[in-house]
Image (spheres, rainbow, N blue to C red):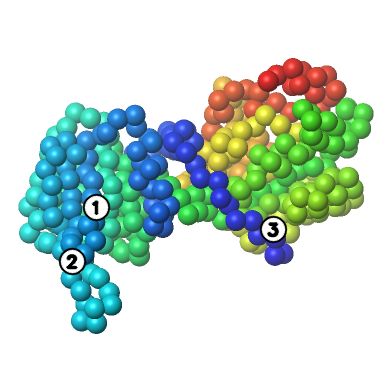
Amino acid sequence: MNNIEKPVFRPEANCIWRSFLTSKKKHIVITGDRKSGKSTLLSSLFDRQMPGITSWAVPKEGVYMKNNSSGEVVRIGKFCSDATGCENLMQPIKDAFNSTCIAFLESLADTTAPWITVDEIGYLENTSYDYQKAFERLMNKKRIIMVVRKQDLSFLNRLCSHKDVFLVDLDRPFGNSGCIIMASGQGKRFGSNKLMAEYHGQPLIKWILDITKDLFSRRLVVTIHQDIEKLCTEYSIPVILHSSPYRNDMIRLGLDTIGSYIDRCAFIPSDQPLIKTESIASLLLCAKNEPSYIWRTCYDKTPGAPVIFPKEYFDELMSLPQGKGGNVVVHSHESQVRQLPVTNKTELMDIDTPADMARLKERP
């Protein structure tokens, strides 16, 4: 299967805070390639400057570190040209790291502010063992939001993989996640194919197609309806048309098609037009940071959909009893289920009858 979508949705401050608070982790790491918006995102998380450290480079001169509270600045790297003159190198100033920079960290540990910000951590910090140890002591005392440069270096890797860190990788914030949009209902209570019924100017299913756009590396619609297959084809959305009668068949067919390409799969109903993209993104961030859990939405502790299953549950999902859905697996592993609250109960409302459609149409 070659239908790969490149996720381009970037989680913003509200989305990240929701996921982070649900995760109950202590720190946040923001990482990504150059010019990916790491520092911009960091500044959007607070309405004022927090105590912390800011580092920046001056081309062909050096790298500087500033204590945001005191305003003190120290040079931590100096510019050097290599022998060929073709590459510019920054060399660490070890005395600065081992004295002034560590003093910065120790002063931050004594502040009363609950959060410390650090922008950014990179190659130079990786060269100082003493600075790393002082930074880890600060992590034990304070909550830190840090921007970490994306480089394969031991200190940076430790920060990104730390057990108390909630990681936001702006290049791939949701990892290798897929989704199956379930569109095989026969619409008996509705009286026709509800998913093609008009809802605020477009077919009902088109809402979830738009809501899930740009979130997943693999997206698949599984349906028994030819008109839905035609609609998905028009929008270049991968779709499977089948005639199998049961819910377990739909799940099996979907996972058989995309399961080997993804690390987790979200199962998304096609009749929830008010679910927000941000809510699905928040759920995906949780699943990326706590990958062993089954994640689902809820409102006031009442569980709902979507539901995200890690790859380790795919075999069980593909072997469900006839006529059963993913709740069989959820109930078998209740200790492994985590919930993300949505902001409004209407997000989890689905449409089963014409009366449901009429009620939801009355909402803005």
Give percent across and percent down for residue 115: 27, 34
Q: Is residue 284 above or below residue 341?
A: below
Residue 79: image tag = 2
Q: Amino acid at mark 2?
A: Phe
Specify which label sits upstream in the sequence, 3 or 2.
2
Q: Amino acid at mark 3?
A: Ile
Give percent across and percent down for residue 272: 71, 32
Residue in the foreground of this view, choosing between 198 and 185: 198
Specify which label sits upstream in the sequence, 3 or 1.
1
Quarter of the image with the N terminus is: bottom right
Q: Are marks 1 and 2 in contact (CB under 8 Å)?
A: no
Residue in the foreground of this view, choosing between 21 and 58: 58
> How far apart, in angstroms, are the residues tagged by discs 3 and 2?
49 Å
What residue is shown at x 69% (from left), y 58% (from top)? 258
Residue that label 3 marks: 258
Residue that label 1 marks: 56
**Label 2 neighbourhood size at 10 Å, few (<14), some (14-19), many (20+)?**
some
What residue is shown at x 68% (from left), y 20% (from top)? 364
